[in-house]
Image (spheres, helix red, strand yellow):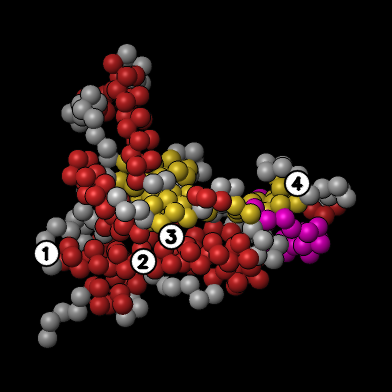
Amino acid sequence: MPEESFFSRYLAGDHQNVWEELQALGEIVEQPLRTDALNVARETMRRVKINLEMIVHRLKKLGFQFSLSDQVFVPVQSHTLQFLNDFEQRWGTLPFSVRAWYEYVHSVNLFASKPISKDLIKSLDPTLIALGFYSGSPLFDYLSNNDELLWYMQGITFLSLSESLTEALESKKKFQQDWAEGKVDDWTRNYCLKNKIDPMILTVDFLPVGMAMSTCEPMGFEVGTAKADCVISHDDDEIRFVDFLRDRLLLGGLLHGHCARNQQYDYLYIGKMPNHPVVISEILEGLLLF
């Protein structure tokens, strides 16, 4: 009896194990395994695309306001596949999850805000606060009648492939200029010399996606490996791309954020929305598992 394919197992619901096992294989270059892994990645991102569309629709119904309404979710465009093929031929192979993402999604800027009432702050469960900016009295005591409260969600942002490539090339060219002018620090210069890295050869090994880690270092995709998935963030622990999407979309991580008074960065607290369980249940109901 032939061994069941990863794709068949994925369709049967074994999502987590399939991705873990594919990632453990390292580089996947031989057929039919390569096609099998790509099928898993494409089905995953097909579901992610549907989930994103549902989430955007539900956020709008719940009164969330998007900062860039025409860029919230941009589906794949007609020229994308050719651009994607040209990219891989010129700059290197993308991890399968990343290639599949670009086959279904052009770009995402899922960042929104929503007015919230002072009564919700009054009834806030303290366990929802990750970081408070006031201590002693309840948060409600620090509010005046004139304060307007807004909830800013953490959201997700992913540049288009062309935008990410432009940023990567600009960063590389800036480094080349600094190298030529002797402005590179000794550690970096010695590292390049020791590992026989020629900075004057233009390469792309990292694509910034438009988000940053808590260290302010950019989050992004690695380039040049035929792996199933890749690490997108090093905050605390390494987080792979598919796991990151699961956390933000299926577990409601995108709705974490901060409450502000009157303007975006006048922080009241960071954590979860005061009515987090209610909003989460409405947003997540019926999303496709991946």
- Amino acid marked by disc 3: Leu
Q: Point out which mark residue 261 bears.
A: 4
Q: Tag 4, which secondary structure?
A: strand
The quarter of the image holding the C terminus is bottom left
Residue range of the region highlighted in magenta in the rendering: 113-133
- Amino acid marked by disc 2: Arg
Characterize the local packing of mark 2: few (<14), some (14-19) or many (20 or more) Cα atoms within 10 angstroms: some
Say whether disc 3 or disc 2 marks the residue closer to the N-terminus. 2
Q: Find the distance from the CA under tag 1 to the CA under tag 3.
A: 27 Å
Q: Most extreme residue toward the front, as rendered?
A: 78
- Residue 145, compared with residue 176, is above or below; it is below
- Amino acid marked by disc 4: Arg
Q: Tag 3, which secondary structure?
A: helix
Q: Which residue shows up at 35% across the image and 35% down it?
A: 166
Q: Find the distance from the CA under tag 4 to the CA under tag 1.
A: 56 Å
Q: Find the distance from the CA under tag 3 to the CA under tag 4.
A: 29 Å
Q: Mark 2 points at which residue?
A: 46
Q: Point out which mark residue 31 bears.
A: 1
